[in-house]
Image (cartoon, rainbow, N blue to C red):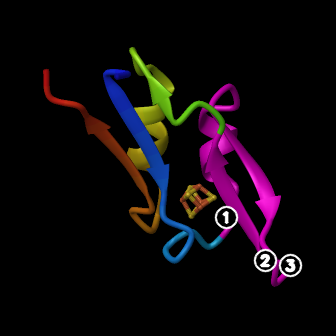
Amino acid sequence: MAKYHIEVDPNLCTGCGVCPAVCADHFEMYDDPNGMPKAKCTHPDIDSVSCQKEAADSCPNGAIKVTENAG
Ligand code: SF4
């Protein structure tokens, strides 16, 4: 199991575009089925984090969760 799991809650994401600006290697925008812009993490399971935490801290809606897996 990868050490970290990174998730964007689409219910909280307002598509502001900050996370791909802060961390382009790991976040990208897409349009949901309603045509609303949302962000997604391109590598949700990964062994080390760099700018993902900065992106989570920068998200104005607290939509990005970085979880460290036990073990
Ligand atoms: S910073 Fe937060 S609200 Fe903005 S696009 Fe990323 S996840 Fe969505």
Q: Which residue is mark 2?
A: 36
> Residue visible at 34% across and 22% down?
1
Task: Report crowding for label 2: few under 14, some 14 to 19, many 20 or more residues within 10 A (C-alpha).
Answer: few
- The residue at which mark 1 appears reads as 16
Q: CA distance from mark 3 to mark 1?
A: 14 Å
Percent of width and height locating residue 31: 83, 67
Residues under numbered marks 3 and 2 in contact, where contact means CB atoms less than 8 Å apart:
yes
Amino acid type at circle 2 is Met
Q: Quadrant of ligand 1?
A: bottom right
Q: Is mark 1 within 8 Å of ligand 1?
A: yes
Of the image marks 3 and 1, the number of the one nearer the N terminus: 1
Q: Which residues are magenta?
A: 15-41
Q: Which mark is residue 35?
A: 3
**Residue 35's spot in the image, x, y percent?**
86, 78
At a point 70% along the width and 31% down the height, the residue shown is 24
Relative to 68, is 2 above or below? Answer: above
Left or right: residue 25 compared with residue 30: left
Residue 64 percent across, percent down from the top left? 44, 53
Q: Disc 2 versus disc 1: distance between alpha carbons?
A: 11 Å
Binning the other alpha carbons within 10 Å of mark 3 as few (below 14), some (14 to 19) or many (20 upward) gives few
Q: For mark 1, does the 10 Å Cα neighbourhood hold few (<14), some (14 to 19), or many (20 or more) residues? A: some
Label located before the other in sequence (2 or 1) = 1
- Please indicate whether residue 10 sits to the left or right of residue 63 in the image: right
The disc labelled 3 sits on which kind of residue? Answer: Gly
